[in-house]
């Protein structure tokens, strides 16, 4: 999975910093928003949006702790 | 055409090509919303920018840039981008007017859209968007086609980071030219040694924060279309809205509180975001500007809440906190989202407190306008240093420290001079704008001096809060004046003065 973002030229051109976590968040952002736009407000989409923000916060904390 | 002028023209061509890319990308929106009548206008706008851009790059030539040309490109480029960026407004408004009734739904032909048939209104909207100001010619934003709602938000989103940053990321320039241009767009600190890497990093940070902001606003209760647009305009501290009454439309404290961190994110410099995302929180805290953003926002909000309470503007402390906190952060971050009737119900002192927030702005290197906190701090600390100098013997060796840097006397003088000049120019143009607007708006409109000060400070600080002066019905000269104020405010004045001098003084022409 960690190889996936680096093979996408757009993401590589955008970041170029080689941080797989943020690249994955950037890639999954449009997917999350697209799913919300298609399915509307429901338990699933609410959980998806919360999960997206939570994933960012947890990754940020993890980077802060390990660096 | 001289070779230097050809260099300027070549870079302007690259900027217009990048703009055309934005326009052509926006064709997705009318397809999604089934606003097919808009597509020819958007394609025409993109084609026009692309055509002129290609012509410019063909006529021009790429060469090393000096400071003079960097500034000229920045000033001219922003003006041209605003000019060409107005074509979607103009073309869509005229399409709706001229197209047969079976092509365009009758509900689309509103007075709000009709205002854009006037080119000056379209240019105003475009300049307001790209400079991240948010003052608008639109009476009812919710009556606009979704494509124009998107285009307004998109111009602010791009303008927040910078047209040159966009161009450099897409069409990087050889040699040191990219750095000269980067610095001409009111940016100084780099994240990486390479400018191209720096602007690409700025873009992925901005993109990531946009997705997070959309998710947050949607969770707070906004419909997804509104969340997308407000996340873009909130993060870029632009302030355009897709609703008729800005954020006040929702009457939701949850949405208002959710927007506060979005606006604060836009107020912090990109290099600091990068440090934060890398987990370097120690250096985030050590950054003088970032520390002061939080101090300034806290002190200003508390002061404004106190004034609202003292004048009995609202019935409860919660309401004062809700509106005072939101409006101060909105003003100081130069966003311009509005939840309160500032011009109608707030005391003149409360209005001036908000105007002060707009005047100062937040961090240099972020998406905000104003004179920037670092300049105010440099002037304050520099003055204290100079005054206290008198109390020391002439042989004393003193050191001046700001933002973790120890400055020599020469460096101090240079930084103090730069901060002083920009602040002075800012005040001079503010005063000229106030006097001019006072002369231009009809007295029968009943606007006070506080209203006029607020409006001009809002335009020049690229904020967008309004006391009601800005509208499609205001005099044409007043519109031109505010367009000028927005333009010089975004570029921190000097590049525009350099351009004007080069245009007017024969010996300085490139």
Image (cartoon, rainbow, N blue to C red):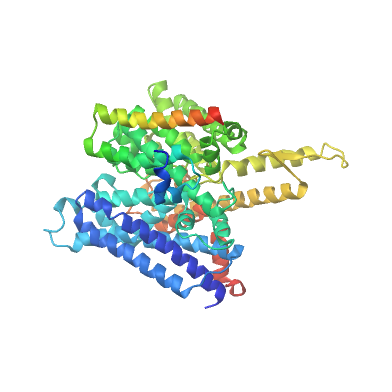
Q: Position of residue B184 (x, y in %)?
A: 56, 57
Total numbered badges shown on the rendered structure? 0
Q: Is residue B414 left or right of residue B304?
A: right
Q: Position of residue B232 (x, y in %)?
A: 38, 43
Q: Is residue B392 left or right of residue B63?
A: right
Q: Position of residue B347 (x, y in %)?
A: 44, 33
Q: Position of residue B498 (x, y in %)?
A: 57, 63
Q: Is residue B200 visible?
A: yes
Q: Quadrant of residue A30?
A: top left
Camera-side residue of B43 and B455: B43
Q: Is residue B112 visible?
A: no
Figure quadrant of the C terminus of chain B: bottom right
Compared with B284, B233 (above or below) is below
Q: Quadrant of residue B385?
A: top right
Camera-side residue of B114 and B406: B406
Compared with A64, B114 (above or below) is below
- Kindly identify the residue that appears in the image at 48 percent across and 50 percent down: B200
Camera-side residue of B147 and B454: B147
Seen as rendered, the residue at the extreme left is B102
Seen as rendered, the residue at the extreme bottom is B1
Q: Is residue B270 left or right of residue B150?
A: right
Compared with B76, B393 (above or below) is above
């Amino acid at each position: 999975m960690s190889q996936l973002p680096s093979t996408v030229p757009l993401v590589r051109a955008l970041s170029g910093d080689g941080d797989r976590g943020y690249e994955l968040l950037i890639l999954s952002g449009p997917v999350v928003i697209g799913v919300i736009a298609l399915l509307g407000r429901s338990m699933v989409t609410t959980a998806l949006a919360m999960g997206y923000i939570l994933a960012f916060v947890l990754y940020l904390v993890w980077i802060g702790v390990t660096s | 055409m001289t070779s230097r002028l050809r260099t300027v023209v070549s870079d302007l061509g690259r900027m217009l090509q990048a703009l055309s890319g934005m326009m052509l990308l926006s064709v997705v929106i009318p397809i999604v919303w089934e606003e097919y009548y808009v597509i020819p206008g958007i394609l025409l706008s993109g084609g026009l920018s692309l055509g002129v851009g290609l012509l410019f790059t063909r006529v021009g030539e790429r060469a090393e840039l000096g400071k003079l040309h960097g500034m000229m490109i920045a000033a001219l480029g922003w003006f041209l981008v605003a000019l060409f960026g107005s074509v979607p407004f103009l073309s869509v408004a005229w399409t709706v007017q001229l197209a047969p009734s079976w092509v365009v739904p009758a509900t689309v032909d509103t007075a709000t859209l009709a205002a854009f048939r006037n080119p000056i209104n379209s240019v105003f909207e475009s300049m307001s968007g790209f400079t991240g100001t948010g003052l608008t010619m639109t009476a009812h934003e919710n009556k606009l086609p979704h494509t124009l709602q998107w285009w307004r938000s998109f111009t602010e989103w791009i303008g927040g980071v910078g047209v040159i940053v966009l161009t450099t990321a897409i069409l990087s320039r050889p040699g040191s030219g990219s750095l000269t241009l980067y610095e001409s767009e009111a940016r100084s600190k780099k994240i990486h040694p390479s400018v191209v890497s720096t602007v690409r990093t700025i873009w992925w940070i901005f993109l990531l924060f946009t997705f997070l902001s959309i998710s947050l606003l949607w969770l707070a209760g906004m419909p997804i279309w509104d969340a997308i647009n407000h996340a873009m305009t909130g993060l870029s501290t632009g302030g355009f809205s897709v609703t008729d009454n800005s954020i006040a439309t929702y009457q939701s404290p949850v949405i208002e509180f959710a927007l506060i961190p979005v606006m604060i994110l836009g107020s912090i410099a990109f290099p600091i975001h990068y440090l934060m995302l890398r987990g370097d929180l120690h250096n985030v805290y050590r950054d003088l500007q970032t520390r002061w953003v939080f101090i300034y926002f806290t002190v200003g909000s508390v002061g404004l809440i106190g004034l609202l309470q003292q004048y009995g503007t609202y019935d409860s402390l919660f309401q004062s906190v809700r509106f005072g906190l939101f409006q101060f952060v909105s003003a100081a971050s130069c966003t311009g989202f509005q939840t309160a009737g500032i011009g109608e119900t707030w005391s003149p002192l409360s209005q001036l407190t908000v105007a002060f927030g707009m005047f100062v702005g937040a961090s240099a290197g972020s998406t905000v306008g104003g004179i920037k906190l670092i300049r105010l701090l440099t002037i304050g600390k520099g003055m204290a240093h100079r005054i206290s100098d008198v109390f020391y013997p002439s042989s004393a060796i003193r050191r001046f420290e700001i933002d973790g840097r120890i400055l020599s006397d020469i460096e101090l003088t240079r930084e103090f001079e730069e901060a002083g000049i920009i602040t002075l120019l800012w005040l001079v143009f503010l005063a000229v704008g106030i006097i001019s607007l006072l002369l231009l708006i009809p007295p029968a409109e009943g606007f006070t001096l506080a209203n006029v000060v607020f409006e001009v400070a809002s335009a020049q600080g690229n904020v967008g809060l309004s006391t009601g002066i800005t509208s499609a019905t205001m005099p044409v000269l007043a519109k031109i004046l505010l367009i000028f104020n927005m333009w010089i405010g975004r570029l921190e004045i000097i590049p525009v003065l350099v351009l004007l001098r080069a245009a007017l003084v024969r010996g300085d022409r490139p």
